[in-house]
Image: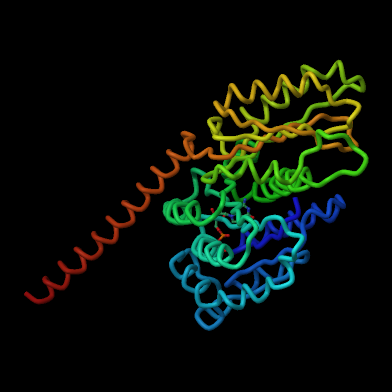
Amino acid sequence: MKVALIGVGQAGGKVTERLARFDAEMGFGAVQGALAVNSAEPDLQSLEYVDTQLIGADRVNGHGVGGDNELGTEVMQSDIQQVLGALDGRVTSSAEAIFVVAGLGGGTGSGGAPVLVHHLQQVYDVPVYTLGILPGRNEGALYQANAGRSLKTIIREADSTLLVDNDAWHEQGESVEGAFETINERIAKRVGLLFASGEAVEGVGESVVDSSEVINTLRAGGVAALGYATEIASEDSAENIRTAMSVSRQALLTGTSLPDATTADSALLVIAGDPDRIPRKGVERARRWLEDETGSMQVRGGDFPLESDRLGALVLLGGAERSERIQQFMERAREAKRAREETRTDHAAQFADDRLEDLF
Ligand code: GDP
């Protein structure tokens, strides 16, 4: 699937850069253009593989919006014409979809991405998706509240919102900050493979995934999740039936970007590997298993021929917002918001008391 990428904010820019780099290094050619937008100038200066656009310079002078996502919304709104202008020519007629990439817990990405998605929907005919990063459980209350607010709006504006939970794709015991490198690399590889899997591969049979399979899977709207797992495969495809099942199970049950997201409206199972090692029977079996497990009647499938001694499964879920994780997340975000409002009220009450004391 040929895509144009727009990263908003720090995490958005870094992940976009990683995606553009992975696609270039692998020679897939799925990424048609990549732009990073930020209100913080230093964050943009560290990027090499993407074009950049500074916003909000008149308001924050290149220093960023801190964690203020309302200010993030305002600066994107005021400078939207510059951002759309910077995209001119990058969202070429060859792009089949646009992905807006952002960390939903911060300020610029959290507040700016929903505004940008809204405007892109007015301008472009291709689907506009979000790749959103959710804060991990141990990130502060402000991050949770920001992400809750951003998520609600962005789900409404985007054609689908692919979520990566910051707790999902790193090793146990690693701090979230220390894990950013690992997480970003995994996002780049997994989402990068998803983009590339929708590319036509010359000289290979009919079961290759088409871009429309990805788009149709995401047509369910709401929240999407991506799972991935690989295992060493035998050279003889008949011996890999069990492996195809096993990687598919792992991809869904332990390897998803949104842990616990197993109920979905639609799903796509891509088996990646050397065509000689891919077992037809195993792929069919895994696909039926995925239907049962997700409760979806719409499970698509296809192969992604790659030169490798491993067999990989990439599982894309569409319409996965009924997952427990999302419900828990929205609840945490609501709690964080309430707690913040109470603190504010306490301060206000205390401030009033102090003033009264001064008066008497
Ligand atoms: P912004 O620049 O104001 O949009 O803020 P950030 O992009 O720093 O967003 C903060 C959120 O993104 C928090 O939940 C962070 O944990 C997360 N975040 C920041 N940088 C990274 C990164 O490089 N990778 C990942 N996966 N998450 C990040």
Count of number-bearing discs: 0
- The image position of residue 6, as x and y in percent, is 65, 62
Which quarter of the frame holds ligand 1? bottom right
Q: Which residue corresponds to the image point at 57% horizontal and 29% vertical from the top-left?
A: 296
User: What colouring does the structure picture have?
Assistant: rainbow
Q: Quadrant of residue 198?
A: top right
Residue placed farthest to the left in the image? 360
- The image position of residue 240, as x and y in percent, is 83, 19
- The image position of residue 242, as x and y in percent, is 77, 17
> Is 22 drawn above or below residue 206 in the view shown?
below
Q: Which residue corresponds to the image point at 11% horizontal and 71% vertical from the top-left?
A: 357
- The image position of residue 176, as x and y in percent, is 59, 47
Residue placed farthest to the bottom in the image? 58
> Is 52 drawn above or below residue 279 in the view shown?
below
Task: Specify whether 109 is left or right of 250.
Answer: left
Nearest the viewer among 181 and 130 is 130
**Which quadrant does the C terminus fall into?**
bottom left
> Is 288 drawn above or below residue 23 in the view shown?
above
Q: Which residue corresponds to the image point at 75% horizontal and 64% vertical from the top-left?
A: 93
Q: Quadrant of residue 229?
A: top right
Q: Which residue corresponds to the image point at 77% horizontal and 20% vertical from the top-left?
A: 282
